Image (tube, rainbow, N blue to C red):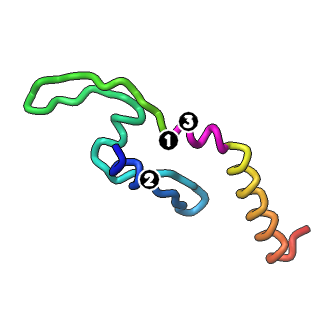
Amino acid sequence: TGKMAGLWRAGSSGNTAFVRNRHPGAGVQEFGGTIRPRGTPFTIRAQPSMTRALEQKEDRIVEIVSDALDDLARRCGWR
């Protein structure tokens, strides 16, 4: 949904980068799964919109991270 789409956020912790969405349905929408509302199970097929978006921008993401690491190395006196 539009609400879910607007809740994606990038972040980092230590040496790990991540993309997350705090919407309670985001995980099952992205990866698929079976939910059991009121005890009645049904399966939702994966609709990996964020995965597709990241894959489409993969080269640019690698370039940005590489540039940031080069900048950090320069600031720390590494060559």
Q: Which residue is mark 2?
A: 8
Residue at far right of view: 79
- The region drawn magenta spans 51-57
Neighbour tally class for label 3: few under 14, some 14-19, many 20 plus, Cα within 10 Å: few
Q: Is residue 4 above or below residue 55?
A: below
In the image shown, does 55 or 16 lie closer to the viewer? 55
Residue at image x 27%, y 22%? 43
Residue at image x 59%, y 43%? 54
Residue at image x 61%, y 59%? 15
Q: Which residue is mark 1?
A: 50
Query: Which SS type dominates the magenta stretch?
Result: helix
Q: Which residue is mark 3?
A: 52
Q: Given contact means CB atoms under 8 Å apart, are the residues at marks 3 and 1 in contact? A: yes
The quadrant of the image that shows the N terminus is top left
Mark toward the start of the polypeptide (1 vs 2): 2
Mark toward the start of the polypeptide (3 vs 2): 2
Label 1 secondary element: helix
Q: In which image quadrant can residue 34 be found?
A: top left
Q: What is the spatial separation of the Cα atoms under label 3 and label 1, in whole angstroms?
A: 5 Å
Q: What is the spatial separation of the Cα atoms under label 3 and label 2, in whole angstroms?
A: 14 Å
Image label count: 3
